[in-house]
Amino acid sequence: MWRATRSGDPAVFDLLGSIHVRTATAAPFQAHIDAAVDRADMLVLEADVDLTLLESLGLVAWHGLSWKPLSLRLDPPTYRALRTKLERLGQPPSGLDLFQPWLAAELISTWERQTAGYDGKMGIDAVVRKRAEARGLPVRFLETADDQLALFSSLDEAIQIEMLEQAITSTTAVAQTDRLVAAYDRGELSSLEDSVRQTAEVYPRFTRALLDERNLGFAEGIDAMASEPGRILVVVGAAHFVGEQSVQALLRARGFEVSRYSIQDAERLLGQ
């Protein structure tokens, strides 16, 4: 967590890096997260992903479906490997045929994590939102679900297919998630930095779009709320808080004083 303030502005921002999936085991500092929610005057999240079924179906159809089946996009050995992978996951072998490669890759990774007990409803941002809504806090968003899906659907086909091939052949998705969650629970940014750097080396354009360009929008959105009095809790993925173009670096460039606080600092800072 970080605190961001700027001289002359009434808003006080508590910035929380989130991890979007967890098992039922709460973060060891969950009490401090709860305190941040309870003392906030407003919650700001990445995007409103809590959509109705009709809204979800519409966005998936627009951004995730294709008339060109995967059986024609992939070479025969890779397509056979895809069918085998889906069977192992308990899914219909041809169930993803009309999906864009990026969405097929995301679904495979999601199903693998689900078999290990990971659930988006247990993610930090989902838990925070549930607590905030129970308190009647106003909730805002820095982008839309349509923005997020458009980022993936606009990727070059070659990149999408590479993502899918990696999802098909990978046997470490759950282990990687385990490591990232463990590092998150320790407050260890170095492991997350390593993961982001490795992804950037393989997918530089995608990483720029997924993190750097969105971070600019996040910083701009936070800056736009600085004139509002009160404490504002901003929760976005923890990967947005690492690297030279991190959210906090961009806020500092806009004149904010940003400081990370530890568990030992949390009670004092959250109480101010």
Image (cartoon, rainbow, N blue to C red):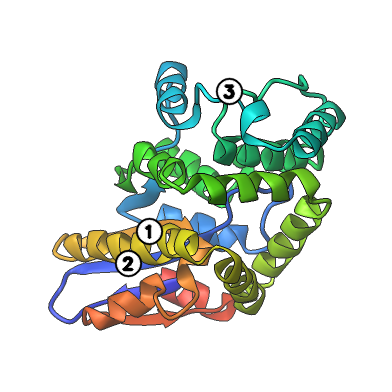
**Residue 2 image position (x, y, % from top left):** 43, 73
Q: Is residue 221 above or below residue 43?
A: below
Sequence-wise, which precedes: disc 1 or disc 2?
2
- Nearest to the eye among marks 3 and 1: give it: 3
Q: Which amino acid type is shown beneath numbered disc 3? A: Leu
- Residue at x 67% of width, y 36% of height: 74
* Label 1 Cα crowd, 10 Å radius (few <14 / some 14-19 / many 20+): many
x and y, in percent, of residue 82 in the image: 77, 34
Q: Amino acid at mark 1?
A: Val
Q: Is residue 21 left or right of residue 172?
A: left
Sequence order check, earlier mark of 2 and 3: 2
Q: Which residue is mark 2?
A: 13
Q: Residue at x 75, y 59 (%)?
A: 176
Instruction: State the image quarter where residue 224 is shown.
Output: bottom left
Q: CA distance from mark 2 to mark 3?
A: 43 Å
Q: Residues within 10 Å of mark 2 (few under 14, many from 20)?
A: many
Q: Are marks 1 and 2 in contact (CB under 8 Å)?
A: yes
Residue carrying label 1: 234
Image position, residue 189 (x, y; %): 60, 76
Toward the top, the furthest residue is: 54
Q: Residues within 10 Å of mark 3 (few under 14, many from 20)?
A: some
Question: For mark 3, what is the residue?
Answer: 98
Disc 2 marks a residue whose amino acid type is Phe
Q: CA distance from mark 3 to mark 1?
A: 36 Å
